[in-house]
Image: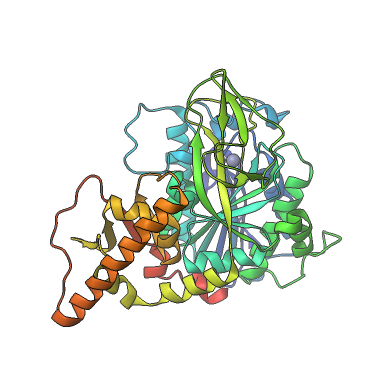
Amino acid sequence: MTELASPAAQDPVTKNGRVICHHVAEAAGPTLIAVGGLHGNEPAGILASLAIDRCLRETTPLATGSFVALRGNLAALAFDHEQPINNPRYVQRDLNRLFHHDDQGHRTPDHDERDALRDAIDAVARESRGEIVLLDLHTTSSDSPPFIAVEDSIPARRFAERFALPLILGIEEDLRGLLMDDTTERLRCIALTVEGGCHNSPLAAHTLEAVLLIALEALGLISPDACTCRDERPIETTRRAAGSHAHRVYDIRHREPVRALPYIPDTDAEPFDRVRAHKTRIARQAEADLFAAESGLLFMPNRQRDIRVGDDAYFVVRRVGRTWLRISAGLRASERLHHMLPKILPGVRHRPGHAHDLLVDPQIAAILRRELFHVLGYRLVRFEATPGLPRLVRAARAARFSLHALTRIAANLLRRGSTDDAQHESDEDWIVRRHVLDTEPATADQHT
Ligand SMILES: [Zn+2]
């Protein structure tokens, strides 16, 4: 292995002090990119990257490929070098919501950070000599066990399983402009968001360090158990930190934004505690009680010191069983399903000009609900959050819907032709899309 020794000025990825370290082995192989400090008050990802840098320099050189660690929001990180935890999360706009194309708002220092970070990642991608995997390292404001969030393609899901951490699906539907999403979309590579634990927990950096080691091993950049810097195997560290949530998979059912100030979180409700719709109080918002909008498990309740309107207030997740995951993986593998769905589901039709999209009538979507599309391998690109319907209403609608579906299937069998509705897209239609790595598999899949 040779560490890239060229002066910073000559290395396109090391300008601005954004690069924490850059290791390149002589043998070509995958590239692992770590990003720490995308939020200014979350130094744990940077600390973990520095520890891995030391480990690669002193005891465990890379066997193949390359490892690059980058600092995220330099502008936010610059406020307090001594006590980074006192930094603001962002300057004016949350950097981890700015990675999308149609951001029309006025330009902020965070937009400059976005462009510079994208350039740095692209520079790494241009030099890479194999597949690329990106880990975006974060910590949470609440005392949550560590977890991983993915843009839910089968290759990303499979890679995420390596870490023994709880896996959260569907976050990219509620949060637009995530770095992991942008990276997957532009570079067609697996990208994971990893939350190492609470901002001020000393264990968070230790957990993220273990996550980086597991990723390095999974990609074959270092041999298994090669690192001798630690007194336990990295997988034991993550498993212990995850506790009873290790290896579990959860689906996002609801995201609530902060709508008004003052916003004072209720500290009784802890992450992954059960909450009941309209019963469990989550916070006081503008002097009124804010109750859970959905039943399920509380996820990422906002406990930041500095809470602004539009920030995430809380999420509700539900556990996804192993059987559903297996069914979902099986269904996604089938190309035919995508062509079949408009024939068997009323209110579902192909979207002209978009081979991987379907349009869903909002009336039908309310009955089918987002979780069904998740199982079928679709990501909701445009949708309205549908409130949970009373059980009887739902059952009645579902019965009517099943009847429609059956008549439709029968009609199609008789006609044997294509029966895709030639209706135009309306603004109310939901748009669901197959996940990009499911339609264009990432090369990293071969390593998982
Ligand atoms: Zn963060």
- Left or right placement of residue 306 versus residue 365 in this view: right
- Left or right placement of residue 109 versus residue 297 in this view: left
Count of numbered circles on the image:
0
Quadrant for residue 164, please give it: bottom right
Q: Is residue 72 visible?
A: no
Quarter that holds the C terminus: bottom right
Q: Quadrant of ligand 1?
A: top right
Q: Is residue 191 above or below residue 257?
A: below
Quadrant for residue 351, please give it: bottom left
The x, y position of residue 264, in whole percent, is 62, 24
Q: Is residue 355 visible?
A: yes
Q: Is residue 363 above or below residue 59?
A: above
Q: Please name the residue shown 40% across and 44% down the image.
A: 385
Q: How is the image coloured?
A: rainbow
The x, y position of residue 308, in whole percent, is 52, 25
Q: Nearer the viewer, residue 222 or 232?
A: 232
Q: Nearer the viewer, residue 3 or 38?
A: 38
Q: Nearer the viewer, residue 21 or 187?
A: 187
Q: Is residue 354 above or below residue 327?
A: above
Q: Please name the residue shown 73% across and 52% down the image.
A: 207
Q: Please name the residue shown 63% across and 30% down the image.
A: 304
The x, y position of residue 165, in whole percent, is 67, 59
The x, y position of residue 271, in whole percent, is 67, 43
Q: Nearer the viewer, residue 216 or 234?
A: 234
Q: Is residue 341 above or below residue 110?
A: below
Quarter that holds the N terminus: bottom right
